[in-house]
Amino acid sequence: MTRKGESITLSISKQQKGRLEGIALAFGQTWGDSPNVSALIKAIADDDGPVKVVWANSLKGADLSEQIETAREELAQLKREKDEIIKSCELIQRGVTSSQKGITKLKRLI
């Protein structure tokens, strides 16, 4: 029997092969009743059927994870900036309070 397309060889452990076969079964990628890892790989490459939906969602999930991490970093930066502003306001308030006390003392002297 001659092959119609390109071929690849994977060097994987029995456990990895078993996991791939389980995934192939879950997505209906079979040869008769047996799981077909080659069909699974083709479905992934072709963005085909239910494999396409799961693959696309996991890629979106990765993108979402990056967005969440970026948002966390931005929030942390905003919090640092807010803390700096609060400290500056407290220093200004102390200065104003000190100045007011000084003015009150001067008024008493006059």
Image: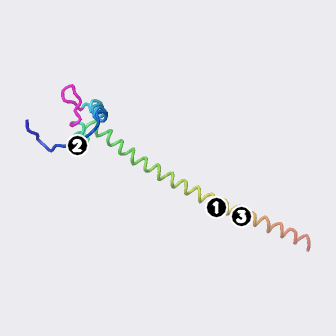
Q: Where in the figure is residue 33, as x and y percent of width and height? A: 21, 25
Q: Which mark is residue 85?
A: 1
> As displayed, is residue 100 above or below residue 29?
below
Q: Nearer the viewer, residue 57 or 32?
A: 32
| Residue 33 within the segment the image draws in magenta | yes
List the single residue furthest toward the right. 109
Q: Residue flagged by tag 1: what amino acid is it?
A: Ile
Q: Which mark is residue 22?
A: none
**Which mark is first along the chain, 1 or 3?**
1
Q: Where in the figure is residue 68, as x and y percent of width and height? A: 46, 48
Label 3 to label 1: alpha-carbon separation: 10 Å
The quadrant in which the N terminus is found is top left
Q: Residue flagged by tag 2: what amino acid is it?
A: Asp
- How packed mark 3 is, by other alpha carbons closer than 10 Å (few <14, some 14-19, many 20 or more), is few
Label 1: which secondary element: helix
Residue 11 figure quarter: top left
Q: Nearer the viewer, residue 14 or 92?
A: 14
| Residue 37 within the segment the image draws in magenta | yes
Residue marked by disc 3: 91
**Which mark is first along the chain, 2 or 3?**
2
Residue marked by disc 2: 46
- Residue at image position (86%, 68%) is 104
Residue 88 figure quarter: bottom right
Residue 3 figure quarter: top left
- How packed mark 2 is, by other alpha carbons closer than 10 Å (few <14, some 14-19, many 20 or more), is few
Q: Where in the figure is residue 90, as x and y percent of width and height? A: 71, 61
Q: What residue span does the magenta drawing correspond to?
A: 29-38
Residue 30 as seen in the image, left or right of residue 103:
left
Label 3 to label 2: alpha-carbon separation: 63 Å
**Which mark is first along the chain, 2 or 1?**
2
Label 2: which secondary element: helix
